[in-house]
Every structure is written in C-alpha cells, then in structure tokens.
Amino acid sequence: MVSNLGRKIEEEFEVREQKGIEKGEDRKAIKIAEKMLKRGDSIEDIIELTELPKDKILELKNKQTNLEKA
C-alpha cells in the first residue's frame, strides 16, 4: 500500500515531468520559429505551425533584427 507521502511524491514527480516536457516543446517551437523568421516566412504561417503566440514571435523577430544591426 502506497502511503500518502508516497502518493504526494509521485504526483509531484509527474507534475515536474510534465512541466519539463512542456518547456522542451516550447524551446523546440522557438527554434523552429527562429528558423522560419530567417527564411522570411510570414508571421501567420509561423503562428500556425509553431502554435506560439504572436507576441512571442514578434519578440523573436525584434531580437533577430537587433542582432543583425549590431
């Protein structure tokens, strides 16, 4: 029989594991968006394919523009 403490530990592990998965998915989507921006793809296409919010894509675009100017 699993104790309450054991269940809480398992639940915490599952929550942290899910957060890690989501963080990895976000990083991958950001990398894809950055490549698409470099390629000149439209903001709308990037939103559709990466499922990132428009404000995040615009932030990435501004970062790329600033790096190119530097």
Image (cartoon, helix red, strand yellow):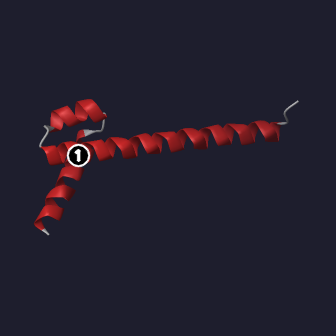
Query: Which residue sits at x=66%, y=42%?
Result: 13
Please tell me which residue lies in front, 21 or 53: 21
Total numbered labels: 1
Residue 1 lies, with reference to residue 67, above or below; the image says above
Question: Where, by quadrant of the figure, is residue 5 drawn?
Answer: top right
Query: Which residue sits at x=24%, y=30%?
Result: 48
Query: Which residue sits at x=55%, y=38%?
Result: 18
Q: Which residue is mark 1?
A: 35
The answer to whether residue 24 is left or right of residue 41 is right
Residue 59 lies, with reference to residue 6, above or below; the image says below
Quarter of the N terminus within the rendering: top right
* In the image, farthest residue toward the right: 1
The answer to whether residue 6 is left or right of residue 54 is right
Q: Residues within 10 Å of mark 1 (few under 14, many from 20)?
A: few
Please, what is the three-letter code of the amino acid marked with disc 1?
Lys
Q: Position of residue 40 (x, y in %)?
A: 11, 43
Q: Position of residue 67 (x, y in %)?
A: 18, 63
Please tell me which residue lies in front, 65 or 15: 65
Question: Where, by quadrant of the figure, is residue 2 drawn?
Answer: top right
Question: Where, by quadrant of the figure, is residue 12 drawn?
Answer: top right
Q: Secondary structure at mark 1?
A: helix
Quarter of the C terminus within the rendering: bottom left
The answer to whether residue 32 is left or right of residue 36 is right
Query: Which residue sits at x=37%, y=43%?
Result: 28
